[in-house]
Amino acid sequence: MNKLVNKHYQDFNKILDNIRKYKQKAYSQVMHTVIDSYWQTGKFISDKVESANWGKGIVKELAEFICQNDPTVKGYSDKNLWRMKQFYETYRDNEKLSPLVRELPWTHNTIIFSRCKTQEEQEFYLKLTIREKYSKRELERQIDSSLFERVIIGNQKISTYLKSVPPSIVNNNFKDNYVLEFVDVPVKHSEKRLQTALIENMKDFILELGKDFVYIDKEFRVQVGNSDFFIDLLFFNRELSALVAFEIKIGKFMPENLGQLNFYLEALDRDVKKPHENPSIGVLLCSDKDDEIVEYALSRNLSPMLVAQYTTKLPDKKLLQAKLHEITQSFDDINNETET
């Protein structure tokens, strides 16, 4: 069998390369469609704002209308709708740059049009990102390091610099959650399969506990500035009249985990919480092979009496720890059976 594989290895590689090429082609076509959709939506809103006095209230109503009438349509929050308007207005009069934006995912585009002040700087990062297929993190790193300014200070022409940079040998393909959401494909969690199992099982467990928990969503997106963050599980507790965010981490408890959760709570309180609701609550679940840690994150503005009320109404820490251990253990057992 090994001889046969070795004999046909080159042919197999050609087929695999061909599959990858068409897979990327399909992804690119969908990505272009997403950008075109956002462009047209931004144009519509821009025209309405200019001619019919549309404001934040109407755009928010539009976002709610889209969500209510077709819950499968993702990526059209009121904040993202305003981004689409800004996106269209940034490039509508620039025939040179408007074709380039269709070569990049939405997340990359938002970084460039929101952080680059001039058309020359926008063109520089658009072309460089397309050429190098920068990840979101790498693009932000280049902007943070003032690469454009350093090239200008060095008296280099942009076109000359771009030609002088050797093409990257790394075969990076653009990835963007907005593309997957547009075609209604579930976005995979960035952590291990264990975390996916923990999220699904903990969701069911919290609902089984009762205690007035109403499930809202998993990987709930919050937007801060031009960045997107995802909360593992989001519930609403009717008795406490508060949003409850659950974050699940694989590995030992780290102090920065609580800092991240508090950051999410501030975003929820600012953009999601209703005026009559109480401050949001966070529950951090850390699952390590040797131990399970559960911590609550509560707003500093809460009175001691409200803190006491919260802690008595939230699921008991020991109960959550036991459930974490049970899920992790069963997951490990399944894996061991599969391997044997």
Image: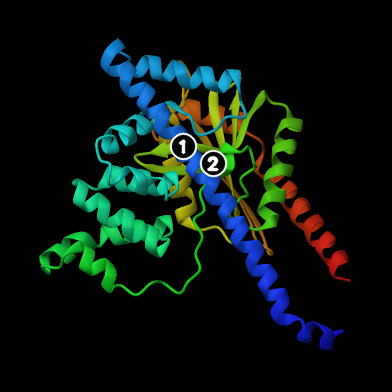
Residue at 72% in and 77% down: 11
Q: Position of residue 251 (x, y in %)?
A: 60, 61
In which quadrant of the rendered view does residue 162 lie?
bottom left
| Residue that protrudes farthest toward the top in the picture | 52
- The answer to whether residue 32 is left or right of residue 239 is left
State how far apart marks 2 and 1 are (Cα).
Answer: 8 Å
Q: Residues within 10 Å of mark 2 (few under 14, many from 20)?
A: some
Amino acid type, mark 2: Ile
Q: Position of residue 329 (x, y in %)?
A: 78, 58
Q: Is residue 193 visible?
A: yes
- The answer to whether residue 320 is left or right of residue 136 is right
Q: Decide: marks 2, 1 in contact (CB < 8 A)?
A: yes
Q: Please name the residue that numbered disc 2 is placed on.
A: 231
Q: Please name the residue that numbered disc 1 is placed on.
A: 222
- The answer to whether residue 295 is left or right of residue 332 is left
Q: Establish if 42 lies above or below 95.
A: above
Amino acid type, mark 1: Val
Residue at 38% in and 62% down: 131
In which quadrant of the rendered view does residue 318 lie?
top right
Mark 2 vs 1, N-terminal side: 1
